[in-house]
Image: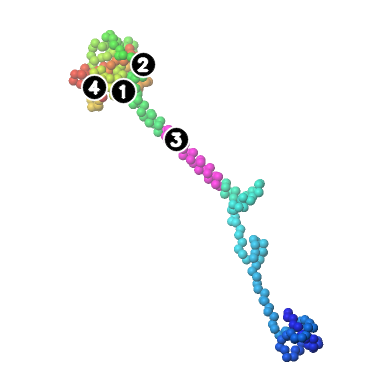
Amino acid sequence: MSYARLPRDEIENIGSTGATTRTGYDAPEVVPGHSDLITAQVQGSQSPEVVHPEQDQPQYGYGNTDAESTAPSYSPANGFTPQHEKDTLAAGDVPPVDYQMTRSRRRKRWIWIIIGAVLLLLAIGLGVGLGVGLSSNSGSSDRNIDNEGITDSSNQTSPTTTSPLPTSTTSAAVTAGTTGLAQFSCNNTASTESTAGTSYNQDCNVQYQVNHPSYYDQNINMKNLEHRTVYTFQSCLDECDRWNSASNTPACRAVTYYANITTPIKLWGGNCFLKNDRGVGYRTDPVDYDHTASAWMGCLNVTCHGAE
């Protein structure tokens, strides 16, 4: 809307039409000398008004409060609770069911892993135990051979001088089994022969213990070559010959025979022990020495010798 100052004489010309007739003027101006100007509203002015068209203003939605907003909305996937929402759960609130199921599956998975590890350890332990047990059983016979004659080695004394008197059994001798008294006959003053004719010198009532120097050579250590269960002294000598016939090394050069078979078989697995050389007589093991006899080959230290 525009306003202009009009001369008084032109005000009268404003009629009912609301138009103003201006003489000689294209635009209102201030007439000098007139101080009684009034302000009039100019209607129908030829000067166009500047009209600013209404512009569409962008509508901004905040959050999801504008129901007509076209901005993409966000909703979490089913079964997942963001960390910031989980942190805001009040005490006593229960997380979504899917979230609880996920945690439950995770716990079950760890439980099965732990159970599998325990079963694996048990299987390994069982395998090791069986292996050790089988190894122990397989080596028992070898230990029996080596242990003959050293049961009470810590209490050993000097070698025993043997009696020259012959001894023999007076009751019925056993010929089978693992207990009882087998045939026995020994004479320190006489030699005896095996079935094959090999000459042996008898050494009554003593044993040739292992892990001691031999009778002839301090550098040769006494050892057991093999053990057998027999029921006569001559059968033990025959076992020595049989060992040599098979070309085993070292050669058998002496034997120790226990006629009372019960304790030797229980302790060492046999009652006839093949030796690598003539030993020094001992009487320290818990056996029946009255029914024990040793013997060495007559060729020893002449045409044959002991060996390690």
Q: Is residue 17 visible?
A: no
Q: Is the residue marked by circle 1 packed among few (<14), some (14-19), or many (20+) residues within 10 Å?
A: many
Question: What number is the disc on residue 306?
Answer: 4
Q: Which quadrant of the rendered structure holds the N terminus? A: bottom right
Q: Is residue 212 visible?
A: yes
Residue in view at x 64 percent, y 50 percent:
89
Q: Which residue is mark 2?
A: 155
Q: Of discs 2 and 4, which sits in the foreground?
A: 2
The residue type indicated by label 1 comes to: His
Does residue 22 lie above or below 150 as drawn? below
Tell me whether circle 2 and circle 1 mark residues in contact (CB < 8 Å).
no
Q: Where residue 130 sits in the image (x, y, percent)?
A: 42, 33
N-terminal label among 4 and 3? 3
Question: What number is the disc on residue 125?
Answer: 3
Part of the protein shown in magenta: 105-130
For mark 1, give the secondary structure.
Answer: strand
For mark 4, give the secondary structure.
Answer: loop
Question: What number is the disc on residue 227?
Answer: 1
Residue 56 colored in magenta in the image: no
Which quadrant of the view contains residue 63? Answer: bottom right
Q: Where residue 285 sits in the image (x, y, percent)?
A: 35, 16
N-terminal label among 1 and 3? 3
Residue 112 colored in magenta in the image: yes
Tell me whether circle 2 and circle 3 mark residues in contact (CB < 8 Å).
no
Does residue 147 lie above or below 45 as drawn? above
Q: Of discs 1 and 3, which sits in the foreground?
A: 3
